[in-house]
Image (cartoon, rainbow, N blue to C red):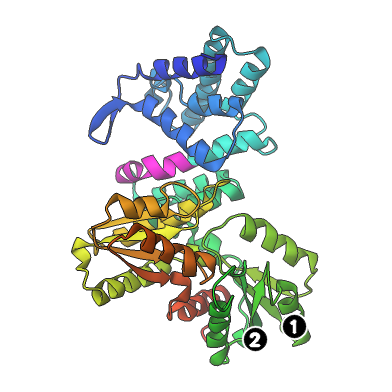
Amino acid sequence: MTFFERALQRIDAANAEDPNTVLVEGEARPAELVYSERMSAMLDRLVPQPSEALQLAARAQHLRRWTIPRDSYPMDRAGYHRWRGELKRRHADWASAILTESGVDAETTARVASLIRKDNLKTDAETQTLEDVACLVFLQHYAADFAAKHEHPKMIGIVQKTWKKMSDEGQTAALALPLDASVRAIVNEALAPVANSDRAAMPLRDVAVILAAHGDRGGDNPNSTLLGHCAALAHDGIFHSVSAGILRGEPPLEVAVHAALAGGAKALAVYPMFMAEGYFTRKVLIQRLAALEIPIDVHVLAPLGADPRLPSLMLRQAVDTASKHGFPPDATRLLIVGHGSKIGPASADATRAAATVVAEERRFARVETAFLEEPEFLDEALSREGNLPTVVLGFFSGDGLHAAEDVPEAIFETRANAAYAGSIGKLADLPALIRASLTAEFDLSTGS
């Protein structure tokens, strides 16, 4: 056993002494041990290869917390801050003792203590990551119970404060969490003022719209679905112009931007045809727009996969597909297939978040997820219950290689009793959904 493994084991043993318990899948387990495991799991989702110091700090975030109860300090704001300050110091001291006893080197031990104390929160990337992880664990696992004990306005304020503690990456991860429905409603309400704060009241006829996409690979007519959506949006004449901007293919993003500027657009609205806030939306797209030094206001909207209206369209398509193939929805599995990734959780998290919302409608016997590039792989999910009536719905923005070839091939090769509903990127109602998002961004209905 390594020093690192021994330290984790001893941290777990200390937290296992917590007399308070929580139910996990029907089993009563020590509360702080469960919390520490949730911290580690969330860290693994957020960071592909966290350092040993960060892993240890996440595991020891609440080390023996039950020994310093809140009511041991005055029940006022000053008392609360004194209690929190003492907790950070004691958690760091207890963790340092365990690490030293486990043979962890002095430099790593000091680093873990610094992370737990949240030293240099605004300038230390790992300290901020630990704060993000703690906020995400709260939202996913504890916010629902917390909301039941507090009045609604106070809970809104708590979520707003939690949001401000997180980095941009943490906030993106939070939007993709499979939250309890009541918590998701609170989050949406809490963030509404933030989402609306930078809206620009501008006639839509002055706004050039660009549907930004990665670009299809494969398929008979690459990017034809995207171009069709552009044509549908342009047909009503509401916007200055509507065009496609491809990051890897034709027509390139830069050409679309230059055409909008040459046409006299007064603002640019970029709608990312992506299923998650990930590398392409947060880095590639933003960097390429910034390099153009665009002289008018640029509004980059949330990506398609994060649109709260999308799950209802997904459900409608799935039910229609089940009906066409004679599958009673209440006896049918809905399998939502996402791309997934070997290097980050954003794609899988966004797929699971949408599936969670769809499942809340209880139209299908089960709603599950599968992926093309990470477990559970699509062929495994199809083979697992091959005779079960299954509707497969692609959580893809286009109709390229994955949607048009990979998914149908998996269904054929596994001989599953499955009907393919196609890619959600091909839904006929998608232009209306995009139009609604653009209208809301500029706070006008017709630009009159």
User: Could you classify mark 2 by the number of other residues whose Cα lies within 10 Å: few (under 14), some (14-19), or many (20 or more)?
Assistant: many
Q: Marks 2 and 1, Cα distance to the nearest angstrom?
A: 9 Å
Q: Which residue is drawn at 77% across and 79% down?
A: 258
Residue 170: give x, y in percent of width and height. 55, 46
372 versus 246 height, above or below: above
Q: Nearer the viewer, residue 261 or 355?
A: 355
Q: Is residue 134 inside the magenta stretch?
A: no
Image position of 182 (left or right of 372): left
Q: Which residue is drawn at 47% across and 52% down?
A: 348
Q: Is residue 443 visible?
A: no
Q: Which residue is drawn at 52% across and 12% down?
A: 98
User: Could you classify mark 1 by the number of other residues whose Cα lies within 10 Å: few (under 14), some (14-19), or many (20 or more)?
Assistant: some
Q: In which quarter of the image is residue 219?
A: bottom right
Q: In which quarter of the image is residue 410?
A: bottom left
Give the numbered dot on residue 149.
none
Q: Is residue 147 inside the magenta stretch?
A: yes
213 versus 446 height, above or below: above
* Contact? badges 2 and 1 (CB < 8 Å): yes
Task: State the residue position of label 1.
Answer: 259
Quarter holding the C terminus is bottom right
Query: Which mark sits nearer the N-terminus, 2 or 1?
Result: 2
Q: What secondary structure is the stretch in magenta mostly built from?
A: helix
Q: Which amino acid does label 2 sit on?
A: Ser
Image position of 330 (left or right of 67): left
Task: State the residue position of label 2.
Answer: 241
Span shown in magenta: 136-149
Q: Nearer the viewer, residue 83 or 128?
A: 128
